[in-house]
Image (cartoon, rainbow, N blue to C red):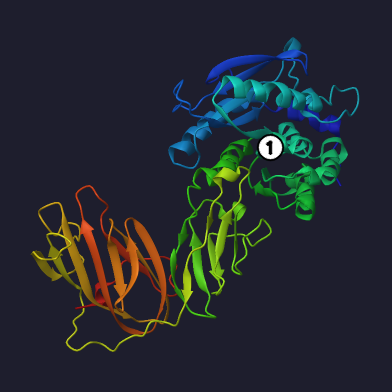
Amino acid sequence: MIRHSTKLIAPFLVLCFFQVVAQPGIKDSIYSQSIKEERRLQIQLPKEYKPGSGEKYQVLYLLDGEWNAELFQQVQAWSQQWGYTPPIILVGVVNSYPNNQNQRFRDLTPTVTGPDGSGGGPALLSFLKNELIPYINKKYPSNGSNILWGHSLGGLFVLYTLFTEPQLFDSYIAADPAVWWDHGFLLRYAQQKMNSITQIKSLFITGRTGTALHGMGIDSLEMVLKDKAPALLQWKVVAYPDETHVSQQYKSAYDGLKYTVAPQFQQDAIHIDPMEGIVEKGKPFRLSCYNILPDKYIRFSTDGSVPTLSSPAFQSENTIMPSSSGIIIKSFFASDTLNKTIKPLFKIKPALTAQQKPANALSGGWSYTCYSDSGMKHIIKSGITNERLNLNQLNDTSNFYCRISGFLQTEKEGYYSFQVVGGPGTKLYLNNQLLVETGNYKSFIVPLKKGFYPIRYEYSHHNGGPDFEFYYLIPGQPENGAIPSSLMYH
């Protein structure tokens, strides 16, 4: 039960901020017929944007814009610099100040609780829907995909908007939302309106650990989401330790952006490892995913059916049981144009047969032969590989072709994953079988016994092209690494 007094807490939420004087970006304004007043805006365009370029961007609408525009400019600049978020447009919706009085309490509360000026939420929502978003779409380079962010009462309004007009924004971020408002109005409202979400939406909610999570009503909302949220709602609740109602905003800004836009930004493909291979019937194998937050939006199946949002979530690390039907992996975003589906090929076969140690075989490296070209008619150099040998500098000229061959000793039985990097025509043979051919990067899983296996790498080195590299992952190890020279025989 939410026990807070609205009259006691609401003034605190209004007064717990300090106005920022210096504001970044473009100052704009629009008169609102819904609210009957001029509303100021703080616009920040991506630094990459060039007028007339035709580039379009996602738009992040920030409630309490006079405070949050500068906060998000800093967070977005850092996050974009390191590749976690794409360029986006920031729109700070500045509060109204008639007679020097901040009207956020009026505008961000969805219901009237008495003669306190509350209940202006529906009017503000009408302003966003019918006036502000069309204005931004017309005047600025918006791609039509929108995000709404709000803190405290702003977080309450974000949730109210999701359950009232879910189609208005693709993603919703509520930082320490005041779910307690009006004796838990939002909890009842969410249960009533949950079924209005008929498209994929993203919801990220933050709070504080301990009694604060309950005091704000967020733990109760989380229970409602666990019980009622449709599969179309991709949601997460995060509680921060050792933070105040105000200090948690910065973490909420970064985490909210990352959860919301990083997956779709880096979703040029579904990146898995190994990418294909041979697996044994009845012996599960590990399949990694290198996309950001894959369990939010990637699903998979192993029975041949096309995955749905109700299918198992694809995690960063997955244990897969080999299936003759194969595995299908699919992403799910609010925008269907971003979605991808892959069906990696994992053939069910027995483990490759190992050999005894070849007669006269010596450990310490593999034999290599460097040719002037792939025709292998003119030998430039040959020898034995070692840790000091740079396989991309075997010749004084810039271009050459190389074959590396020998025997690989395996000391454990189980799944081995081989990773190869190189230019077009780079190949890996094991037991005289072609396992990998790539022009960039490829990984291949194969079950091996203890013993010795003939192995051969072939690659071309071209000036300006990718360097040749190879690694492997042995059974029971968490990460791949270089093949020890002690296990290389020539």
Residue 209 against residue 140 in the figure, above or below: below
Q: Residue at x 13, y 63 (%)?
A: 371
Picture quarter with the C terminus: bottom left
Q: Residue furthest front?
A: 375
Return the residue nearer the eye: 207 or 256: 256
Q: Residue furthest top?
A: 99
x, y percent for residue 165: 76, 35
How crowded is the residue under tag 1: few (<14 C-alpha within 10 Å), some, or many (20+)? some
Q: Residue at x 68, y 48 (%)?
A: 235
Residue that mark 1 sits on = 245
x, y percent for residue 96: 72, 17
Residue 82 against residue 28 in the figure, above or below: below
x, y percent for residue 39: 69, 16
Residue 285 against residue 140 in the figure, above or below: below
Total residue callouts: 1
Task: Tell me where residue 358 sits by quadrant.
Answer: bottom left
Judged left or right of residue 222, residue 341 is left
x, y percent for residue 56: 52, 30
Q: Residue at x 30, y 72 (%)?
A: 429
Return the residue nearer the eye: 232 or 218: 232
Q: Is residue 483 visible?
A: no
Secondary structure under the numbered disc 1 in the rendered image? loop
Q: Is residue 241 visible?
A: yes
Judged left or right of residue 71, residue 187 is right
Amino acid type at circle 1 is: His
Q: Residue at x 60, y 15 (%)?
A: 28
Residue 18 against residue 392 in the figure, above or below: above
Return the residue nearer the eye: 458 or 411: 458
